[in-house]
Each structure stands twice: as C-alpha cells, then as structure tokens.
Image (spheres, rainbow, N blue to C red):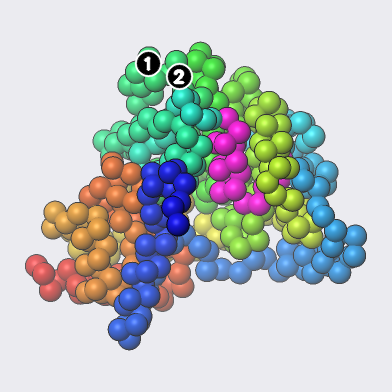
Amino acid sequence: MKLAARMEKLPPYLFLELDRLIERQRALGHDIINLGIGDPDQPTPAHIIQALQAAAERPSNHRYPNYLGSPAFRQAVAAWYKKRFDVDLDPSAETVGLIGSKEGIAHLTWAMAGPGDLVIVPDPSYPVYLSQAILAGAEVYDLPLPAERRFLPDLDSIPESVLTRAKMLWVNYPNNPTGATADLSFFEEAVALCRQYDILLCSDLAYAEIGYDGFRAPSALQVDGAKDVTVEFYSLSKPFNMTGWRVAAAVGNPTAVGALGTLKSNLDSGVFTAVQEAAVAALAHDPFTFFKEQSALYAARRNIALNALEEMGMGIPSPLSTFYIWFRTPRGMSSSEASRFFVEEAQVVVAPGSSYGEVGEGWLRASLTCPTDRLIEAFDRMKAAMARIS
C-alpha cells in the first residue's frame, strides 16, 4: 500500500517519538519522569466542571453544535478580548470556535496557503506550523530565532523575494519552546511588515496567561490596524488546565476568520456545545486570581529548575512566561544524544530541541507541568547523572 506523496515529506511528530522512547524504558522496569510534554498537571477549576455537567444534562446540547461556535461562546471570547486586551471584536465576523488551537492552526494554513505559496515559519517553533504548511503543499521559509536576539526574529533579514511571495507569517509569544517573550513594539513591527507585503500575520497566543515577575503578555491585535492583517489563536487549554477539553478560538481579520470557518464546516462539526458552555463559564468567571495562582505555582517550579541547571553548570536567564525551560545540551552533545542520555541515565524525559527546527539543535526543553515533588526528583536525577560523567 502506497501512501500519498505528501506523507513522505512529513517529519515524525515529536511527541510520538518521545512516547516510543518512554515505552521502551518502562518495559525495562524504569520509573520515568516525563518533562517532555507541556500538559498541565493541575485540575480544571471546579466551576468549569460544574458548568459542563449542567450543560451535558440538557438534551438540546446533544445535537450537532454550531459549526462556527455557539453565539454565546463567540460573544464570550469577544468580551474577554475587550476585558483582557481592550480589543474590540465582532463576535459574528471576527471570531470562530475551534476544537483546540492545533486544529485551527492546521485548518487556517490549508485555507490560506497551497502549492506555489510560501509560509514563513519560526525556527525553532511548535511543529504544527511546519507540518501543516508541508501538508498544504506550500513552501516554507525558516525564520531563525537566535539566542543572541532573545529568541526574537530579525524581520529585516527576510529577503524581499520571500516577502513578496509569502502568504503567512507565524509568530508565537510567549514562545514554545524557548519561553521567550515579546513586547508590543515587536508586534507593531510585525504588523507593519505584513501590511506592507499583504501577508497574514498568524499570532499563536496559547501561553498569554502565564506570567512571572510582573510580566503580562500583549496581544498582536492591540496594534492599531492589526485586524487588517492578523489572526490570533487564543486557547483555553493552558490557562485553565483544559488541554483535554479541546476548545479555543481564532479571532481577528474577518476574511481569514471566515475562510477558516468555511474550511472547518467542510471538515468537522464544531465543539460539543456543553464544552462551549463550560468555556463561557471559564471566561466569564473573572479568572485573574486563578491565573495568578497558577503562575505562582509555575514560578516556584521554574526556580527549582533554574537552580538545578545552575548547579549542573547549565544556567540560563530566567524566563518570564510559559511553563518551559529551554537550555543548552551538556558536554557538546547533540539534542537527540542529550535527550537519550537523560532518559537512559536519569530516567527523565526532556524534549530534544532539534525536534522544533534546525536552530533548536543543541538545546533541550523541559516542561514544568508535573507535580513539584516529582520535578525536584527529576532534576536531582539529572544532577546525579551529570556528576557521573564529570
């Protein structure tokens, strides 16, 4: 049986490879601590669960949902953007509900780019930006995020020949995998560039509500005129500990949002309405206190990781957002060698930076989304493994 040619161009998905590595180690009887995947270990807030339970009891919610998101959910998203970012959105034309951001990122790429088009993808970055451009048949221009620029791209370095062909430019701040942040001036620069060359600016704002040391992430849509060229993805997964619920929204430019909705209506049937009602409860409950508590928990875990890395001679600047720690591999190892070393010698899984792009080679990503006592144990194991090879 021969697969479609596009499948041959698709790199292995990072987390599938990590799962196989974990399975092999567990088969050997090892206790594995997995710091490779960013999946919050804390529960979804009780009032959101209660809203889901009540909504699931109503027979009217057992039917097909609204393809584009229920009016109540889209209105809640618009109200949240006004409250959080002081951004005005038309719920009917400038918001669309998603079965999680990953789905929306994929479908927007298919709606906007195809063979002969070009998509500008950061390197390193969330692998879905690259994989979906490949599946859509588009070409990819890798935009480096160098450490010396605090993992911000040099937009002035993009060749004119790329800009004139590009259909989409992906940005993701706060950033996965590096934990880097951007201020509003960066988004002003990106919006200006995209307006000049008629490029869709695609802002992935998945980690907006995790902030340390007083940091609060801006939205690209806060820039004057941003909606002319920008679509932004806002997910409930990370801020509300709802990764398994699969609910998010795309907001911004009405043409792109409309195209995304049209494509989705041909491919899926939308988010279960009871989940959307729970999402409305999440956004309407004034969650700032909850965000502050979650950020405090991650900040404490961040400090544990930073102190351990310093003791291992692998210290890094303190990140201001996300629940990721992005650090250099030890002893000149490649990313894959270092990832395998920590699994085999410490029974700790960390993600190889090369899985996020060529510029990620020589780096590792550790997630803070495991119980604090297990995180301490993980870094103690890693320190012990490093001591054995010093």
Disc sitting over residue 384 in the figure: none
Residue 147 appearing in the image: yes
Q: Is residue 118 above or below residue 336?
A: above
Q: Which residue is mark 2?
A: 165
Q: Residue furthest left?
A: 390
- Whether residues under marks 1 and 2 lie with C-beta atoms below 8 angstroms apart, the answer is yes
Residue 282 in the figure: left or right of residue 71: left
Amino acid type, callout 1 = Ser
The picture places residue 166, in percent across and down from the top left corner, at 46, 23
The picture places residue 233, in percent across and down from the top left corner, at 60, 41
Residue at (24%, 55%) from the top-left corner? 335
Amino acid type, callout 2 = Arg
Per the model, the C-alpha gap separating discs 1 and 2 is: 7 Å
Q: Please identify the quarter of the rendering in which residue 62 is found.
A: bottom right
Label 2: few (<14), some or many (≥20) within 10 Å? some
Q: Secondary structure at mark 1?
A: helix
Residue at (25%, 47%) from the top-left corner? 361
What's drawn in magenta, residue-wise?
96-112
Q: Which residue is mark 1?
A: 161
Magenta part mainly helix, strand or loop?
Answer: helix
Which residue is at the front of the view, 45 or 176? 176
Q: Please identify the quarter of the rendering in which residue 243 is found.
A: bottom right
The picture places residue 178, in percent across and down from the top left corner, at 37, 47
In which quadrant will I find the N terminus? bottom left
Q: Is residue 99 magenta?
A: yes
Q: Is residue 363 above or below residue 158?
A: below
Which residue is at the front of the view, 12 or 317? 12
